[in-house]
Image (cartoon, helix red, strand yellow):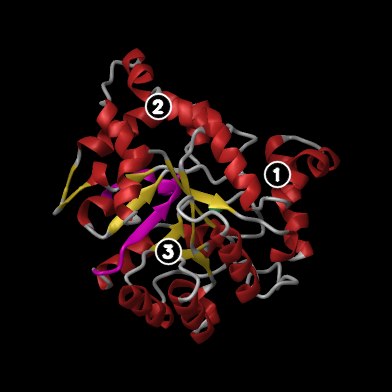
Amino acid sequence: MIINMHSHLIHRDMWSDKFWDITLDAYSKSYKIPKEALMKTMMPEIANANADALVKAMEKAGIDKALTMGVDWGMSVVGEAKWSVEEFNKWVADQVAEYPGTLYALCAVDPRRGEKAVNLLEKSVTEWGMKGLKFHPTAGYYPDDQKYFPLYEKCVELNVPLYSHTAVTITAPMESKFADPIYLDSVAAKFPDLKIVMVHFGSITWPYKCHEIMGIRPNVYAEISGYQAQAVGTPKRMLEFLRGVFDTPGLGTSIVDKIMWGTDWPLLELILTDEKWVDWVKNIPEKAQEYGMRFKQREIKKILGLNAEKFLKL
Ligand SMILES: [Zn+2]
C-alpha cells in the first residue's frame, strides 16, 4: 500500500492574481525557465490540478491513496482570491468525494481568521468528512500564538491532526521564519493530545530540529515530501540522516513509526516526477548499500504507506 500524504488540488480562483504572478516568478528564477515557457508547460498542469488529474497521476506512479488539500494564502501579502476560504475548501471536499476510499482531504485555513477558522474546521470534518487541519505559516503567522489555541482545542475535540509546513519557501515575499518547527514544539508541548505532522520534515534547513522534536514529543509526526530535491542532489546525506532518524529510540514513541511519505503533487514534478520518487524510495535498500548503509524493506514499507494507513485510521 502506497499512500501520498501530501498533494494539492488547485483551481485558478483559489489564489489571487498576485499570488500566481509571484509564484511563476519564483519558479522561473529557481528553475531557470522563462516565465512564458512555464505558462505553457507548468501552468496548465498546476491550474488544472483537480481530482481526475490527481488520480490519473497516482495510477501512473502506482500510488493507492492520497491526502490532498488547498492552501489559504488569502491573509498573506497576496490578498484574498476570487473564491472565499470556505468556497475553495468546499470545492476540495467535493472533488475528493468523487473518489471515496482513494482521496482524503484536509481543511486549509489561516488561523488568523479566528472564530471563522474554528467553525470552518468543524464543518469540514463533521459535514464534509475532512481529515484534519493544514497550515502554511509562511503566509505570515507563528503557530504558537495563544490566539490560535481555540483552533487546537477544536482539533482535539474532533480528534483530527494539524499538518504544518516546515521548510524554507521559494515563494517570496512569503517568509520562511514562520515555518521554523520550533513553534510547533511549543504547540505540541501545550497540547499533548493534538497530533502534529511536520510537513516536509524540516526540508534541508531544519531536519535535525524536527528529528529532535519528534524524539521527545510522542504527538509529533513527520512527512517527507520535498525530499525529492535531496534525493536528486544529495542522496548520501539524505540517507545518512534518515538512517540516524530510524535508529533513534524516541521517548515513549518509535520514530520509524511516525515518518510518512508524500510528493506535494503537482508542485515538485519538475524536480522528480511522482513515479520516479516512488521508485527512488522503493530502491533505498539497494541505493544505501552503495554508501555502506542498511535499510530494511519493512522500514521502507512503513514510510511508504503502513504508517499513514494507521495514522489516517484507514
Ligand atoms: Zn504543499
Which residue is at a point 59% across and 61% down the rendered structure image? 70
Q: Could you tell me the amino acid type at mark 1?
A: Tyr
Residue 90 visible (yes or no) = yes
Residue occupying the point 20% across, 35% down: 247
For label 2, being within 8 Å of ligand 1 is answered no
Q: Which mark is residue 242?
A: none
Q: Nearer the viewer, residue 26 or 160?
A: 160
Which residue in the protein does label 2 denote? 282
Residue named by callout 1 = 27
Q: Earlier in the sequence, mark 2 or mark 3?
A: 3
Along the line of sight, which residue is nearer the eye, 77 or 66? Answer: 66
Residue 291 position within the rendered picture, expressed as x and y whole percent measured from the top left: 34, 16
On the image, numbered disc 3 is attached to which residue? 131
Read off the magenta span: 193-212
Give percent across and percent down for residue 300.
32, 32
Q: Report, in whole angstroms, how far the alpha carbon at label 1 lies from the one at label 3.
A: 30 Å
Residue found at the far right of this picture:
36
Element class at badge 1: helix
Mark before the other along the chain sequence, 1 or 3? 1
Closer to the camera, 84 or 137? 84
Q: State whether residue 218 is above or below residue 294.
A: below
Taking the image as shown, residue 182 lies to the left or right of residue 133, namely left
**Occupied quadrant, residue 296:** top left
Label 2 to label 3, Cα distance in Å?
27 Å
Kind of residue sitting beneath label 2: Lys
Residue type, numbered disc 3: Lys
